[in-house]
């Protein structure tokens, strides 16, 4: 039984958009996010440090999702089965985990695990696909 990757195209698109929207929303409300993820009795220095780190993290997440969206919309990885599965799974999980991160007030450091597994990993595979498929077509 083979997978029809064409069925994953709308799901992957929606997962990418969902992850992107949640990241933008969390970046816009970074002060509230930092307030909720720090322990009680934090100092202003702690607040500023974690605000800077999370702002960088959310911005990097947005950039990586944008890179992946560009590669997807250009058709470079749209019909590559393995990348479609990895991307779809990673972005669905990222959307769920980021919602839980905000709603359940997880520790600030938890974001970096979500970033590593759900933003950096699929972006890495997208860049590999760009190098293998996108640049290979021009030769």
Image (tube, grey):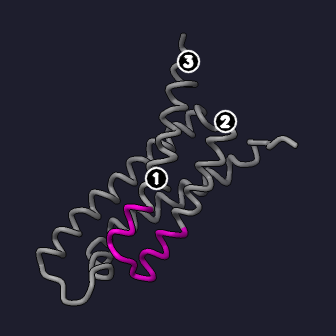
**Direction from residue 9 to residue 70 in the image, left or right:** left
Question: Against 57, is 79 above or below?
Answer: above
10 Å neighbourhood of mark 1: few (<14), some, or many (≥20)? Answer: many
Q: Give, as a single range, the part of the protein colored magenta.
A: 96-113
* Residue 15 percent coordinates (x, y): 59, 57
The residue sitting at 42% across, 76% down in the picture is 102
Question: Against 43, is 111 above or below?
Answer: above
* Residue 23 percent coordinates (x, y): 41, 62
Pick the front one: 109 or 135: 109
The first of marks 2 and 1 along the sequence is 2
Q: Which mark is residue 80?
A: 2
Q: CA distance from mark 1 to mark 3?
A: 25 Å
10 Å neighbourhood of mark 3: few (<14), some, or many (≥20)? Answer: few
| Element at label 1 | helix
Q: Which mark is residue 119?
A: 1
Q: CA distance from mark 2 to mark 1?
A: 18 Å
**Direction from residue 85 to residue 7 in the image, left or right:** right
The first of marks 1 and 3 along the sequence is 1
Quadrant the C terminus occupies: top right
Asked if residue 19 lies in the magenta stretch, the reply is no
């Amino acid at each position: 039984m083979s997978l029809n990757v064409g069925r994953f195209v709308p799901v992957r698109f929606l997962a990418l958009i969902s992850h992107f929207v949640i990241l933008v929303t969390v970046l816009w409300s970074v002060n509230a996010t930092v307030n909720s993820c720090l322990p009680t009795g934090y100092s202003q220095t702690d607040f500023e440090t974690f605000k800077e780190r999370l702002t960088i993290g959310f911005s990097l997440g947005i950039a990586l999702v944008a890179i992946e969206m560009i590669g997807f919309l250009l058709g470079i990885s749209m019909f590559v089965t393995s990348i479609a599965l990895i991307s779809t799974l990673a972005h669905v999980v990222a959307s769920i985990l980021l919602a839980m991160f905000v709603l359940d007030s997880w520790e600030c450091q938890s974001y970096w695990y979500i970033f590593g597994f759900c933003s950096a990993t699929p972006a890495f595979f997208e860049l590999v696909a760009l190098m293998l498929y996108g640049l290979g077509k021009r030769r």
